[in-house]
Amino acid sequence: MLLDKNSVTPFAGKIYLSSPTMHGDELRYMTEAFETNWMSTVGKNIDEVERLAAEKIGVRYAVGLGCGTAALHLAIRLAGERLYGAPQTGTGTLAGHKVFCSDMTFDATVNPVAYEGGEAVFIDTEPDTWNMCPAALERAFALYPDVKLIVAAHLYGTPAKADELRAVADAHGALIVEDAAESFGATYKGRQTGSFGDYCVISFNGNKIITGSAGGMFLTDSRADADKVRKWSTQSRDAAPWYQHSEMGYNYRMSNVIAGVVRGQMPYLEEHIAQKRAIYMRYREGLRGLPVSMNPYDTQNSVPNYWLSCLLIDEDAMCSMHRGDLDYDYTPERGKSCPHEILDALTLLNAEGRPIWKPMHCQPIYRGHGFVAAADGADVSADIFRRGLCLPSDNKMTPEQQSRIIDVIRRCFD
């Protein structure tokens, strides 16, 4: 049912999908960096944030970088160098090699493969957690037996089936880069995400559960790898009395100012997770009885950080909807709805939602790449994208505001 805009009273202030939540300590540590003149890429804030991240994740070393994508790039470069050796000048470590990648994710997970000259092959999603499907991954090795690298993400803060993915990787002698950008604080079988891969990363982007406005972290148990990433991230300067460079480097190091924001946020991680969980549970209860379900997780083995609450509409409750590359349309039907009808209704309410990540194999830039489903004719990623949406999940949203959001969603199915 298409809502009349005159029947919806918007919030006075916008309800965001997931905005930063500041507590005050962030400003204190930023000011400390300013007053002591440690404004660049060294300082006490960076040292402390690296210590806290490594301690929380349960690894020996963490390297603070300018963003999660930088961390992914250097992790993938490390993996490529380990597998195939240092590249020739002007080529990447993965030049000429295929890499298995999560299909349902933000393109930052995948783009660093291209930075290093590799070719992503996309692995379909499984419906239990909306993450990389172990069965599809096994099937992919039958099709591409020479692949030696997997890049796997934890979607929306929900852990993937890490043990199953690791078992497949080990059986084929492959390395895993674990993209835990969205899942800081989530656990699988009692272990923190960000500790399962051969190389692991987290993100402190502005909308993440802990933010520095920017920033990311490379995580490892190898001191040699940590030292290499630290060197690469500061333009690969050699230990010479002058500026000397023997390999390619990048301006990727985290600043001490950004680190101050992250440092001030860190004590509030569990509080943020509890707030996000409460939001998820209120949606689940408030939408009970509608032909919808929430983004799933393995209740026996995993504890998400509930970063984003998402909705999946039952197939028989979908009204007619069409998407092009840049536009969409739908036909309202009584008793049915679709992601864009709900998103349009949320916009009337002055609340922010968004579609599920468009699968990588459907993206114009990657349409020529391989895609491997768990079974012939299956495409779980595309189906979730078609029927799913991300709901307002800001931890500053009050229960009363969320109740109004739930009411508008329910009215879309009238």
Image: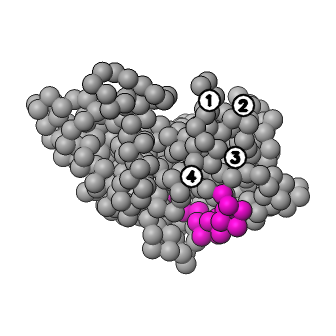
According to the picture, the residue beneath numbered tag 2 turns out to be 365
Residue at 79% of width from left, 47% of height from top? 371
* Gap in angstroms between the C-alphas marked 1 and 4: 23 Å
Give the amino acid at mark 2.
Ile
According to the picture, the residue beneath numbered tag 1 turns out to be 88
The residue carrying pointer 1 sits among few (fewer than 14), some (14 to 19) or many (20 or more) residues within 10 Å by Cα, namely few
- Where 388 sits versus 246, above or below? below
Give the amino acid at mark 3.
Val
Q: Nearer the viewer, residue 256 or 396?
A: 256
- Where 116 sits versus 84, above or below? above
The residue tagged with tag 4: helix, strand or loop? strand
Q: What is the x, y in percent for residue 71?
A: 47, 42
- The numbered mark, 3 or 1, whose residue comes first in the sequence reads 1
According to the picture, the residue beneath numbered tag 4 turns out to be 177
Q: Nearer the viewer, residue 324 or 251?
A: 251
Mark toward the viewer: 1 or 4: 1
Give the amino acid at mark 1.
Gln
For the residues bearing labels 3 and 4, Cβ distance under 8 angstroms: no
- Determine if residue 253 is in view: yes
Q: Which residues are magenta?
A: 157-174
